[in-house]
Amino acid sequence: MNGEILNVHSVLETDGMITVTAPKRFSSKLKTTALNKSEVFSYVHDGKEVILYVQDSAFGDVYSADEMRMYLAGERDARDNYKANHIALIGYLICGAASLAVGDGLLVLVVPPVAYGTLQLLGKVKIREKYISDKNYKFNDVYAEGFEPPARSKKIIKGIAGGVLGSVNGLIIYFLKNQ
């Protein structure tokens, strides 16, 4: 239910649980994992898709199965295709300039990057055509709702990371300049 697609060798369905056997990452060994049925949208068995997702507004599952498929595609596309490198670059420049201007102090390493990362909560996440794996989702609101949370998280993390790097470099330049 997070948009990930797992390739597994076997699926065993029991009361409320699904046990999957899948290869370990970077290994030929198999790993068995037990998942709650509510964590799995669907699986394919003998060429047929078995959908486990059930629309139930009491648990917050307000989308139909087709809408949830679009939502999950949005999550997957944001995780795989959205990079937010421009956010990191702008954070690097702004926080580096702030650190260079203010100079000495521990706060200059913390406050600007955190403030810049917090600013990433504002505004909309732009879904460009290059991020979308299926062009039929281009103007779909449910797809956009799925795309937004992982993309927003990436914006915040990249903003803080770029800001910290810029602040450290600005402080180093400040100390080298004022020696």
Image (spheres, rainbow, N blue to C red):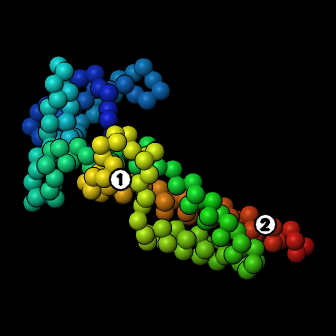
Of tags 1 and 2, the one toward the viewer is 1
Q: Answer whether residue 92 is visible to the viewer in this image.
A: yes
Q: Answer whether residue 36 is visible to the viewer in this image.
A: no
114 shown above or below 76 = below
Q: Residue 118 placed where, x, y %?
A: 48, 71
Label 1 sits on residue? 147
SS class, disc 1:
helix
In the picture, measured across the screen, residue 17 lies left or right of residue 27, that is left
Q: Residue 63 placed where, x, y %?
A: 16, 53
For the N terminus, the image quarter is: top left
Residue in view at x 39 percent, y 21 percent: 29
Label 2 sits on residue? 172
Q: Amino acid at mark 2?
A: Ile
For the C terminus, the image quarter is: bottom right
Q: Residue 34 placed where, x, y %?
A: 23, 36
Residue in view at x 41 percent, y 54 percent: 127
Q: Amino acid at mark 1?
A: Phe
